[in-house]
Image (spheres, rainbow, N blue to C red):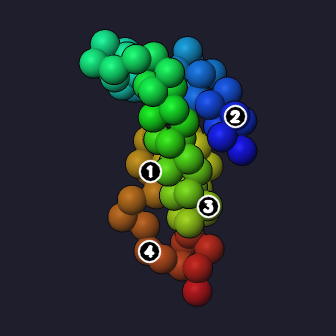
Amino acid sequence: MRGLLVEAAQSAVRHEPQMRRAYQRLAQRKCRALAKVAMARKLAVRLYWMLREEVDYAQLLQGSYAGQPESSRGRS
């Protein structure tokens, strides 16, 4: 599981500016391997919130689910 998360995080770092900045900041302070694992953890936390709030990745990044009533997110 860790390997898959690291691989997904590497892809996210290449394509998402916010993740790229966080990775570069960590890579300068610590070694690149630790920065990759930290980005994988950040991605895992995002995955957790996506599952919990029942939103897709684009909505999570935009924060468009914020302020909606509980029932509109699929909860009763």
SS at badge 3: helix
Disc 3 versus disc 1: distance between alpha carbons? 15 Å
Comes first in the chain, label 2 or label 4? 2
| Mark in the foreground, 3 or 2 | 2
Question: Quick check: 66 above or below 7?
Answer: below
Q: Looking at the rendering, which quadrant does residue 8 occupy?
A: top right
Residue type, numbered disc 4:
Pro
Percent position (x, y) of residue 25?
30, 19
Question: Quick check: 9 above or below 70?
Answer: above
SS at badge 4: loop
Q: Residue at x 66, y 40 (%)?
A: 2
| Mark in the foreground, 3 or 4 | 3
- Asked whether, in this view, residue 25 is left or right of residue 55, the answer is left
Percent position (x, y) of residue 7?
67, 27
Q: Mark 2 points at which residue?
A: 3
Number of labelled discs? Answer: 4
Disc marking residue 12 = none
Residue type, numbered disc 3:
Leu
Disc 4 versus disc 1: distance between alpha carbons? 12 Å
Q: Residue at x 56, y 66 (%)?
A: 52
Percent position (x, y) of residue 31?
40, 17
Q: Looking at the rendering, which quadrant does residue 14 occupy?
A: top right
Q: Mark 3 points at which residue?
A: 51
Q: Which residue lies furthest to the left in this view?
A: 29
Residue type, numbered disc 1:
Ser
Disc 3 versus disc 4: distance between alpha carbons? 17 Å
Query: Considering depth in this image, is 14 or 68 the residue closer to the camera?
Result: 14
Q: Label 4: few (<14), some or many (≥20) within 10 Å?
A: few
Q: Mark 4 points at which residue?
A: 69
| Mark in the foreground, 3 or 1 | 3
